Amino acid sequence: MAGVAGAESYSARMRRKLHRVRNGVRKSGVDYFRGDGSDWIALVGLLLTIPAITLTTIAIPVWCAPSALVLPIVAGGLLLRPASLLSLYAAAAAALIVESMVLGPYPDGPARVTPGTVLVVAACGLFGLLIAQFRARVGVPWRRGGTMLFDLRERIRVQSALPRLPKGWHREMALRPAGGQSFSGDFVVAARTNGGRTLEVVLTDVSGKGMDAGSRALLLSGAFGGLLGSLPPHSFLPAANGYLLRQDWDEGFATSIHLVLDLDSGDFELLSAGHLPALQLHAGSGRWEEKSGEGPLLGVYDGAQFDSAKGSLRPGDVLMLFTDGLVEAPGRDLGEGIDRLTGEADRYVVPGFEGAAWHLIEAVAKDVNDDRALLLICREA
C-alpha cells in the first residue's frame, strides 16, 4: 500500500509540474502576442537563421545570395525591440564579413558580397530600426496593433447600433467613411429612455474626415453615449458642448442633431447644434419638409443655447437624418444636394424604405471623399 501511495504521490507531483509548465508556456505565449512579454524567443529564433543563411550562401551562392540576410532583418524590425534589434544587426554584419572572406572579392565572379549588397542590408536595417523605435514610442507592438485597431472599429460599430423598436416602427442606418477607411468622423449614439417609450438618437459630424477625425469621434461617441439617457433631453447638447470645450482641441468643433421621439404618439423634438436640417416625408401629401432646431456648433463657445423644433410622425411618415457628406460638394449649392437626396428617396415611397439607407448613399454620394451617414426612422402605415 505504501508503494502504491508513493507511486500515486509521484504521479500527482508530475501532473502538477506539467500543469505549471503548460500554464507558464501558455502565459508566455499570450504575453508575447499582446506585447507584454520578453522578445527573447523571437530574438533567438532570428539569430539562428543568420548562420543558416550564411552557410547556405557559402554552399550555393547562386541560389542563396548574400542579400538574403535582409529577411531576418525585416522580420526583426517587426518583432523585436530596438535594443534586441541591435544584437541582430551585429550578427548580420558579422555574417556579411564571413561571406565576403569565404566567397572572395566581388570582381572575381557573381554571387559575391558587393557594395550594393551591403547598402541593401544596411538600408533595410535602418528602416527596421525606425519602425521598432516608432512602436516603442507609441507603446503598441506590431503583433498587437492590428488587433487593437480591429477592436476599436468594432467598438465604434457597436456604439452606433440602433436599438430595436416596437412593432409599427422601422429604423436603419448606413455609415460610409471617407476613402473606404474603417474609421469615420460621423457617428451615431442611440438609446431607448423613459422606460423604453422614448427613442433618443444623436447624429454627430466631427470636424475632419476619415482617420484624421476617427480618434476624436471614438472619444466623443463614448462620452455622448454616457450622457445620452443620463440627462434630460434639453440638457444633452449643453453638456456635450461643455465636454468638447474642455478637450481644448485645435480642431475641436462638431455638428450634432438630437432626436427625441415618443414611440407611442409619434411626436418628436429635434435639437440641433449647427447641423443640417432633418427631412420629414409626409405620407398624406408625399412632400418632404425640413425640420431643424437652432443652435451653434459644439465646441465653439460656452453657454450656448439650443432651441428645439417639434413635429409628429404619422403612419407612413419618414424622418431622415444625414451628414453634409451626402449633400455638399464643391461648386454645388446645398439646396441642390438636398433636392437630389429627396428625389432619390422618393423612389422608395411605394416599395418601402427597408434597405434604402445604403442605396441612397450609393445613389447620391458614392464617390464623395467625405464621411457620409444616413439615418431613417419610419412609422409604418
Image (cartoon, grey):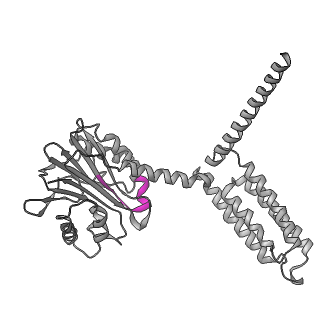
Q: Is residue 184 magenta?
A: no
Q: Is residue 49 left or right of residue 80?
A: right
Q: Is residue 332 above or below residue 285?
A: below
Q: Quadrant of residue 37?
A: top right
Q: Nearer the viewer, residue 83 or 204?
A: 204
Quarter placement of the C terminus: bottom left
Residue 151: where, in percent of width, then height? 49, 50
Q: Quadrant of the N terminus?
A: top right
Residues 115 and 318: in front is 318
Within the image, what quadrant is residue 196 found in? Answer: top left
Seen from this angle, which residue lies furthest top? 1
Q: Position of residue 3 (x, y in %)?
A: 86, 19
Residue 145 placement, left or right of 55? left
Tag count in the figure?
0
Q: Is residue 147 left or right of residue 331?
A: right
Q: Residue at x 31, y 63 (%)?
A: 358
Task: Name the one closer to the observer, 77 or 26.
Answer: 26
Report x, y in % for residue 284: 7, 59
Asked whether residue 300 is in view, the answer is no
Is residue 190 depicted above or below 371 in this figure? Answer: above
User: Start and end of the magenta stretch?
Assistant: 203-216
Residue that extends furthest to the front in the rendered view of this protein:
1
Q: Give the residue displayed 75% in from the left and 73% down from the top.
A: 119
Q: Looking at the image, which residue is at 37% across and 61% down?
A: 208
Residue 285 visible in the displayed image: yes
Q: Is residue 205 magenta?
A: yes
Question: In terms of depth relative to the viewer, which is nearer, 233 or 330?
Answer: 233
